[in-house]
Image: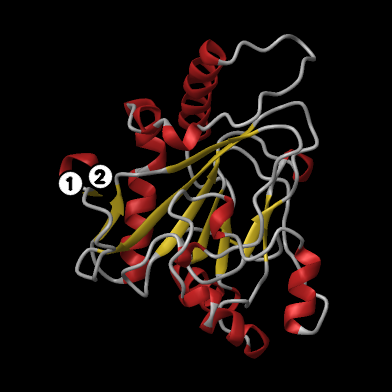
Amino acid sequence: MANFCDGDDLANVTSRLDSDGYVFIRNFLPQDEVQEALDFLVENLCQRFPLAPGGPMPKNIGLIRRQDLAAAETVRRVLEHHKIYNLLRRLLGQEVVTPEFKWLRAVGTGQFTGVHSDRVFLQGSDRMLTVWIPLGYTPLEQGALLVVPGSHKLPEFQEIQRTYGSSQVGADGTQSGWLCEDPGQLDKAVGRKVVWRTTHFCSGDIVILDSRVLHMTATNTTKEMRISCDTRWQPRGDRRDPRVSNWHQQFPDEE
């Protein structure tokens, strides 16, 4: 993904986030805790969707609606890990909060997420950030994240930011908030071939995204589910999206 950083190098993280609109941090979270969260989710999904070996992947798994699973202690301690709190506190210069709601996803064969920015789904603070967390090894062919570097600020994307980027759409957090399905449409909109960055993600990796940067996921062409989560973060003192009533913050005994 080209611009991966050491999570302890705050100056580099800040610089990359400003210039590219995202920061990739390899092996940031404890792999054993991520694996435990993944195992918990898979076990619960298999109870609802029994899978035959080599059989077809179910459609519309709807993991985003299973906020009870996102709130389970095994999962929550990864999605709201104290290392994330601490890094974003340093990055944003003050205490941070995160919505109780988590954009937890299980993406089956043939599925993908289209081109979008996160700001259209949740508004409020101009300094809101997304932390994308792959739960387990996620190669490109399993539906890895792709990002357009600089799309949050480069001149050729200004019209998209002024129109689509300023809208409030996709309350369900899915297709209704996409800018487009086909990344080729983005090429036409900006008048050039858009460069996408991606990589094979490992357990423990995270990507921090500016809420305005354009991104999508590759199509999952495997027979395995891609399980990941988007979490949103903003300064505690900033304006919050009025549609979200429950926010979490870190307490001293969680550090």
Task: Tell me the amino acid under the disc marked 2.
Answer: Glu
Q: Residues within 10 Å of mark 2 (few under 14, many from 20)?
A: few
Please tell me which residue lies in front, 176 or 29: 176
Q: Where is residue 84? Give x, y as percent.
A: 39, 51
Task: Tell me if I can see residue 161 in this picture.
Answer: yes
Residue of label 2: 255
Q: Where is residue 165? Give x, y as percent.
A: 51, 74
Identify whether 164 is placed above or below 141.
below
Identify whether 255 is placed above or below 131.
above
Task: Tell me the amino acid under the disc marked 1.
Answer: Phe
Q: Where is residue 78? Give x, y as percent.
A: 41, 37
Residue of label 1: 251
Count of numbered circles on the image? 2
Residue at the (69%, 46%) spot, across then down: 112
Q: Are marks 1 and 2 in contact (CB under 8 Å)?
A: yes
Residue at the (54%, 38%) spot, across then down: 105
